[in-house]
Image (cartoon, helix red, strand yellow):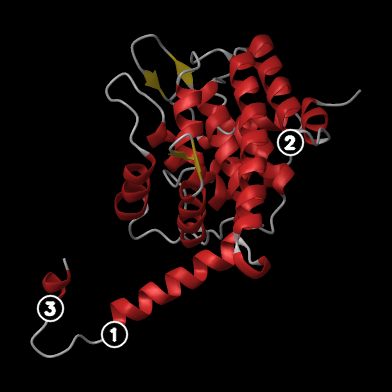
Amino acid sequence: MATFAQYILNEPDFVKKIEIASFLKKKQNTYFNTSVIMKAEIAREFMSTMKIDVDQNMVLTAALLYDCLKIDSPEEITRLQNSQEKYRRYLKALGFDDRFCKICAEHSRVGRNPNVPREKEGDILELAEQFGALLVHRSDRLAYSVPEALEILVNKNMKGIKNIYLEQFQEFVDIMEDIEIMHLGLLSRFQKDLNCVTRNDIPGAVREIYATMERNEEAFRKREAELRMGGNLLDELKKARAKLKLFQDAPLLPGFNLDDLK
């Protein structure tokens, strides 16, 4: 008989993975709601758009389960005071191996030994967790906008932290926000729509994921067709960034300063 781990890891379809994780919530009352789905979708879109060379199946499965022992109370969301070992034992009981447990644990650096090498997949989970948490409404604050969330991520949450995908993640957000649907960037549109879904409305979140996938695919297809000489979005963005850096690094003429350019 297949374990839960085999069942969800052998499912290649992202939406069906969501349904399997939802089934675990019903059976064992694990933590699973629309905020988890939002973070997992951010990880999925990041890996797909930037063509990240990692085990994407492992990342998406971990994204749906890494915080499964958290509790959601009416007053506030509080993290169960469970040790990493307790999380590891729970995931192992579901049939997951040690590497999967390590990747899940690396979504946060709290309590982690900084001298232990990290998994690449763990760095993606970390960015999805940090960025996604800023995009959802909480009891003590409204969600940050996408530009605000990126600013906080880069200059506060991840300041001084070595995450191998941070620069690529910034490029990813720029790409997604540069393509607008109904006057909103793709990430902002997804954030707005999913935040309108009731926190525990998993079917509603699944419907929004389907809509997001179709919307983004069509938007990218149209944008690629608009680019000159068969270019692609990522190359165009990198060229623009390179030109901006050349301008920023260039010495100003004597007697001028940056304030003169405002």
**Res 184 → quadrant:** top left
Image quadrant where one finds the N terminus: top right
Residue 92 or 166: which is nearer the viewer?
166
User: SS for tag 1?
Assistant: loop
Between the C-alphas of marks 1 and 2, the distance is: 53 Å
Instruction: Return the x and y of residue 30 as percentages of the image width and height.
Output: 59, 18
Sequence-wise first label, 3 or 2: 2
Classify residue 206 as left or right of residue 38. right
- The residue at which mark 1 appears reads as 250
Q: Which-is-in-front pick, marks 1 and 2? A: 1
Instruction: Return the x and y of residue 250 as percentages of the image width and height.
Output: 28, 85
Q: Dot 1: few (<14), some (14–19), or many (≥20) neighbours within 10 Å?
A: few
Classify residue 89 as left or right of residue 67. right
Q: Dot 3: few (<14), some (14–19), or many (≥20) neighbours within 10 Å?
A: few
User: SS for tag 2?
Assistant: loop
Q: Give the numbered dot on residue 257.
A: 3
Residue appearing at x 35%, y 37% in the figure: 145
- The residue at which mark 2 appears reads as 96
The single residue placed furthest to the bottom in the displayed view is 254
Between the C-alphas of marks 3 and 1, the distance is: 12 Å
Amino acid at circle 1: Ala
Instruction: Return the x and y of residue 2 as percentages of the image width and height.
Output: 88, 26
